[in-house]
Image: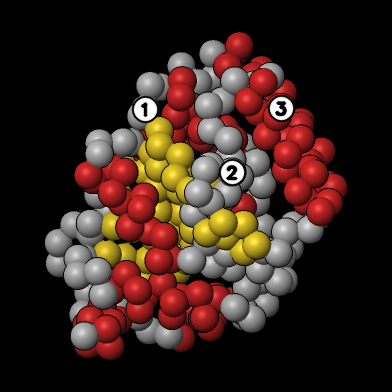
Amino acid sequence: MPYENYAKWKSMPIDTQPRLSIVIPAYNEQERIVATIGAIASHVSDLGFPWEMFIADDGSRDDTVNIVTALGLANLVVLKAPKNGGKGSAVQRGMLAARGKFVLFADADNSTPIEEVSKLLQKLEGEGYDVAVGSRAADGAEEGKKSFFRKVLSGGLRWIVKNIFRIGVKDTQCGFKMYTHEAAQKLHTKQTIMGFSFDLEILYLAAKYGYKIAEVPVSWIDAPGSKVDTRKEVQRFLRDLLKIKANDLRGVYR
């Protein structure tokens, strides 16, 4: 009964701890945020457990906040930011506000379909992992409509992460990751990078703190309307690699 489950979720606030919290960072997403919310709410509501959603605004200058607020969904919380602080900042606010036993971060463009959520949930709830990383590089992943330029850059960055930075995750940047509540709280409390490559720091910390990490192959498509300036983000990514290592040497993560 998909519609009945969704109707209950949208109108009746849950009165128990959510099994799952979903955090979606949003910056000027008025054109596609409703479609993403609808797709997620329809699918997850039909899984049959209590859950909540957070739209973590990042200082949007369009009508994103007003549009989401006007939906009036009982189990959706809008976290409004006074100014743009970076994607990592938005995700951090959502993660620290989440109450669920498990917490999923998903991109606003729904590039990784929400139907993949059960794969990550199985790793945490069924197999005892602390962190499950949706991956476009793991065996069995499906990656569609990615430009040749982005493929080359992604391959280069993945080589650096693996061979120089020694992080045992092939794809650190896919916007589809799930944590236990305890891991989400600890990792995002220690987070210092608030921009695009915050994921890298979070996974570095997860490995440093001894969390059990699963890399899960997922389907992914390069959705239109991306706000990522690839060249600039590569520069920031490399800069943040150095910042993370410097933080560690200075004892910031202790």
Q: Give the class, few, some or many, for how many residues have Cα within 10 Å of label 2's Cα (few <14, many ≥20).
A: many
SS class, disc 2: loop
Amino acid at pointer 1: Tyr
Q: Residue at x 23, y 57 (%)?
A: 19
Residue lying farthest to the front in this orientation: 140
Marks 1 and 3: which is nearer the front? 3
The answer to whether the residues at label 2 and label 3 have Cβ atoms under 8 Å apart is no
Instruction: Judge by depth and name the residue closer to the eye, 243 or 165.
Output: 165
User: In the rendering, at what x and y percent does residue 99 appear?
Assistant: 28, 53
Residue furthest to the left? 16
| Residue depicted at x 57% and y 64% | 111
Asked if the residue at tag 2 contacts the one at tag 1, i.e. Cβ–Cβ closer than 8 Å, the answer is no
Mark 1 vs mark 2: in front: 2
Mark 1 or 2, nearer chain start: 2
**How would you rate the neighbour count of disc 1 (Cα within 10 Å): few for under 14, some for 14-19, many for 20 or more?**
some
Residue 142 is drawn in which quadrant? bottom right
Of labels 1 and 3, earlier in sequence is 3
Residue assigned mark 2: 137
Is any part of residue 239 visible from this angle?
yes
Q: CA distance from mark 2 to mark 3?
A: 14 Å
**Kind of residue indicated by mark 3:** Ile
User: How many labels were placed on the picture?
Assistant: 3
Q: Is residue 134 visible?
A: no
Measured as percent of width and height from the top left, residue 198 is found at 60, 40
Q: Which mark is residue 37?
A: none
Q: Which residue matches tag 1? A: 211
